[in-house]
Image: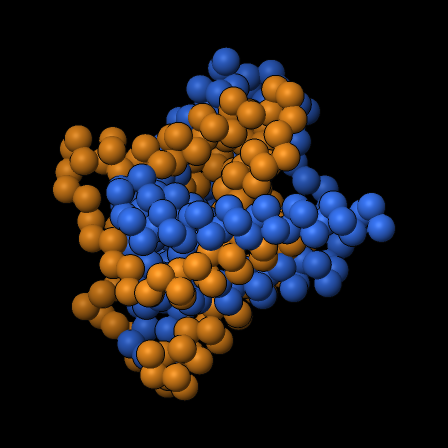
Chain colours: A blue, B orange
Amino acid sequence: MKYSIASFISGLVFGLGLIVSGMSNPEKVLGFLDLAGLWDPSLAFVMGGAILVGLGAFAVARKRTLSFLGFNMTIPGHTHIDKRLVIGGLTFGAGWGIAGFCPGPGLVALGAGESKAMVFVAAMLAGMVIFEVIERARTKA
Amino acid sequence: MIEIAWSNFTPWSALVGGILIGLAAASFLLLNGRIAGISGILGGLLTPARGDIAWRLAFLIGLIGAPTVWILASEMPAIEINAGYPALIIAGLLVGIGTRYGSGCTSGHGVCGLSRLSLRSLAATLSFMAAGFITVFVIRHLLGA
């Protein structure tokens, strides 16, 4: 129960952060991705602010085996940089550049009742399902 | 030369929002011991495992509920979605497949990965940033859409 409450609060604060920062607005995100047009550097400040806090949090987390609520620390330890990682990143980035939506802002815009965000999120879920189906077929073969 | 759109540039709200996002990721990490990667949290629901569903839903309800909480205090900022429906569908499919194949998105690799100084996440972040820059260049400046 407390695990889910902490999850809820993190999700809520994350969403509020996306709204305050302007990142729930795809046009603002595209303003950052448009280097050749009039460039809006704001997204770099969002990342900078988040990472500043994150650096401190991970420094604390690294010294612990249990979280403050007593759960196991499950921080990924993968270090390999492979084709999947890069091709996945490029694929995601292309989609991000087309609509200006990544998963978080897409869900926030959906929560704001934007019908176009609903279409984006539905397609994103379909993409995730397609990935699962292909992945399962692959591991079976 | 890069020309800055000074009229759109909002460094302070971006920084404050970024700090909030950082606090969200930090609380998730320090309370639950997990990385706040949104594509991973969402994607995990598609292959549901026992005891692994409630917290994922709770996180997503918080995220999706943020605008509802926001409008209790202030007016919701504009959400301008200029992409048409076919473009939104293609974008969604690419984001869905890409984030799962690459094991993360802007939150998991970008915010959390860079915060834990992961070279793997840096490679992922550079990949999706590069693809984002190139895609917008092609759409806006080569195709003129």
**Residue at image point 40% right, 60% down:** B88
x and y percentages locating residue B133 in the rendered image: 46, 72
Residue name at image x 18 percent, y 36 percent: B71
Q: Is residue B108 left or right of residue A41?
A: right
Residue B9: % across, % down: 25, 64
Q: Among all residues in the image, which is located at the extreme top?
A: A1
Question: How many numbered marks are there?
Answer: 0
Can residue A60 be seen here? The reply is: no
Q: Nearer the viewer, residue A105 or A47?
A: A105
Q: Is residue B25 visible?
A: yes
Q: Residue at x 53, y 70 (%)?
A: B130
Residue drawn at x 40%, y 53% as measured from the top left: A120
Quarter residue B73 falls in: top left
Image: A114 above or below B59:
below
Q: Is residue A1 left or right of residue A72?
A: left
Q: Nearer the viewer, residue B123 or A86?
A: A86
